[in-house]
Image (cartoon, helix red, strand yellow):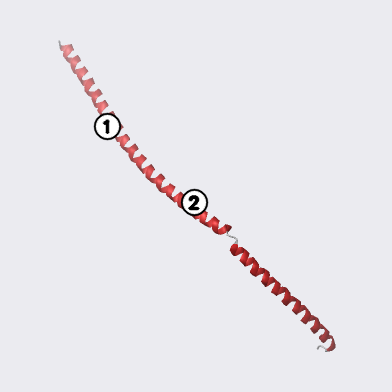
Amino acid sequence: MATIARMNWAIYGALIVGALAVVGAVAFVVVRALQAWRAYKRLRRHVGRELARLADLGEVTTEKLEAASDTSTVERSLARLRVSLARAAVLRAALAEARGVFDRVAWVFPRK
């Protein structure tokens, strides 16, 4: 009988240790599941925020592309440049004519 009683305590001890291991494992799984859930919620929140930021950057890029492809201001500037170049050509011709007259007059007057 003495060996059976000792054997029962060994069995009960092993059962208690096994039950504690199962309880510890369940607690570990629950803690990890909660951490995973929190990480998932945080990921969703950050993904949503980054997607919104990406959409805003896309809108800004679209606006800048529309502004860059708007050639009306460039065409107006080009027209003003053509007018300015025409005026410069007229002034250059007038300067060449005045220089020609000055050169003819300079031959007549002696220099020092």
Q: Farthest residue toward the top?
A: 1
What amino acid is labelled 1 in the image?
A: Ala
Query: Image quadrant for the C terminus?
Result: bottom right
Neighbours of disc 1 within 10 Å: few (<14), some (14-19), many (20+): few
Answer with the quarter of the image where residue 40 lies.
top left
Closer mark to the observer between disc 2 and disc 1: 2
Q: Farthest residue toward the left?
A: 1
Report helix, strand or loop for mark 2. helix
Residue 101 as seen in the image, left or right of residue 31:
right
Tell me the tag on residue 58. Answer: 2
Residue at image position (67%, 72%) is 84
Viewer-proximal residue among 49 and 79? 79
Residue 18 as seen in the image, left or right of residue 73:
left
Answer with the quarter of the image where residue 81 lies.
bottom right
How far across and down, in percent of the image, does residue 66 sit?
A: 54, 57
Q: Which residue is mark 1?
A: 27
Report helix, strand or loop for mark 1. helix
Residue 6 as seen in the image, left or right of residue 31:
left
Residue at image position (17%, 12%) is 4
Viewer-proximal residue among 7 and 49? 49
Q: Disc count in the image?
A: 2
What amino acid is labelled 2 in the image?
A: Gly
Query: Image quadrant for the N terminus?
Result: top left
**C-alpha gap between disc 2 and disc 1:** 46 Å
How far across and down, in percent of the image, does residue 85 sit?
A: 69, 71
Neighbours of disc 2 within 10 Å: few (<14), some (14-19), many (20+): few
Residue at image position (16%, 14%) is 5
How far across and down, in percent of the image, does residue 87 sit?
A: 69, 74
